[in-house]
């Protein structure tokens, strides 16, 4: 990939998913180990039930996440997300199968990182390994936040109710 192109997308990823000690070069190294793939609207990037062989970094466009489930039937929409975003990581890192289908919503550009390469780079303390870990943490945090919001909606919890309950400070903890 051209350095200018990679640096631009690395900077965009860091703007959206900042982390302490972030370096554009780390994210650029990660992107350089991936293969660019252009996908037209309506085409699948991955399909439910197939072996998960890649982690994706969405660079341009939006992606629908759909699930048919065990009995087939009508697809259920799980999410629609836009760039920049890491996806397809859970099944790929576990060596499992896809639990959903990801479809391009219009033209899409992704960096496709082979699962074996992603697993190999995760332990690296610096560079692409650190960037991948941080981007995965952001993706997992986003997914957890979405799940939390969904549970609150299903349980009909008022939005003005406190989200977290912390114990009141005690004299022993505060040193008073």
Image (cartoon, rainbow, N blue to C red):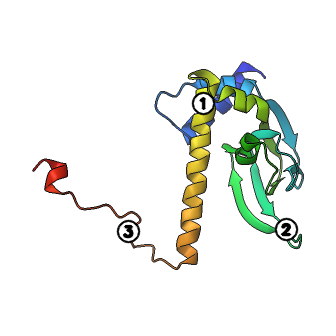
Side of 82 relative to 18 (left or right): right
* Residue toward you, 81 or 134: 134
Up-down relation of residue 20 to residue 97 (above or below): above
> In the rendered view, would you say 66 is above or below 159?
above
User: Going by the image, does 135 lie left or right of 118?
Assistant: left
- Tell me the distance, in whole angstroms, between the alpha carbons under discs 3 and 2: 37 Å
Relative to 107, does residue 79 appear above or below in the rendering?
below
Between discs 1 and 2, the one toward the N terminus: 2
Q: What secondary structure is marked by label 2?
A: loop
**Residue tagged 3:** 162
How many marks on residues? 3
Closest to the observer: 83 or 71? 71
What x and y, as percent, mark residue 121?
68, 26
Near mark 1 (Cα within 10 A), the count class, few <14, some 14-19 or many ≥20, is many
Residue in the image at 71% along x and 44% along y? 89
Marks 3/1: CA–CA distance: 33 Å
Characterize the local packing of mark 3: few (<14), some (14-19) or many (20 or more) Cα atoms within 10 angstroms: few
Q: Which residue is mark 1?
A: 131
Residue 58 rendering spot, x and y as whole percentages: 73, 42
* Residue that badge 2 annotates: 70
- The residue positioned 28% from the left and 61% from the top of the image is 167
Q: Position of residue 36 (x, y in %)?
A: 82, 32
Q: Residues within 10 Å of mark 2 (few under 14, many from 20)?
A: few
Separation of residues labelled 1 and 2 (CA atoms)? 35 Å
Nearer the observer: mark 1 or 2; the answer is: 2
Tell me if 85 is positioned left or right of 61 in this view: left
Tag 1–tag 2 contact (CB < 8 Å) = no
Instruction: Name which residue lies at 86% across and 39% down.
Output: 38
């Amino acid at each position: 990939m051209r350095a200018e192109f990679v640096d631009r997308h690395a900077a965009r990823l860091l703007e959206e998913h900042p982390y302490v000690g972030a370096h554009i070069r780390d994210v650029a190294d990660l992107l350089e180990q991936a293969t660019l793939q252009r996908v037209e609207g309506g085409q699948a990037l991955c399909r439910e039930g197939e072996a998960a062989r890649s982690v994706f970094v969405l660079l341009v466009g939006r992606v629908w996440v759909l699930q048919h489930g065990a009995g087939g039937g009508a697809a259920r929409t799980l999410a629609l997300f836009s760039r920049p975003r890491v996806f397809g990581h859970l099944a790929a890192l576990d060596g499992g199968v896809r639990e959903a289908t990801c479809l391009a919503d219009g033209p899409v550009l992704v960096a496709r990182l082979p699962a074996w390469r992603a697993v190999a780079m995760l332990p690296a303390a610096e560079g692409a390994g650190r960037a991948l870990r941080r981007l995965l943490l952001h993706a997992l945090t986003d997914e957890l936040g979405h799940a939390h919001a969904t549970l609150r909606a299903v349980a009909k919890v008022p939005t003005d109710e406190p989200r977290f309950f912390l114990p009141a400070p005690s004299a022993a903890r505060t040193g008073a």
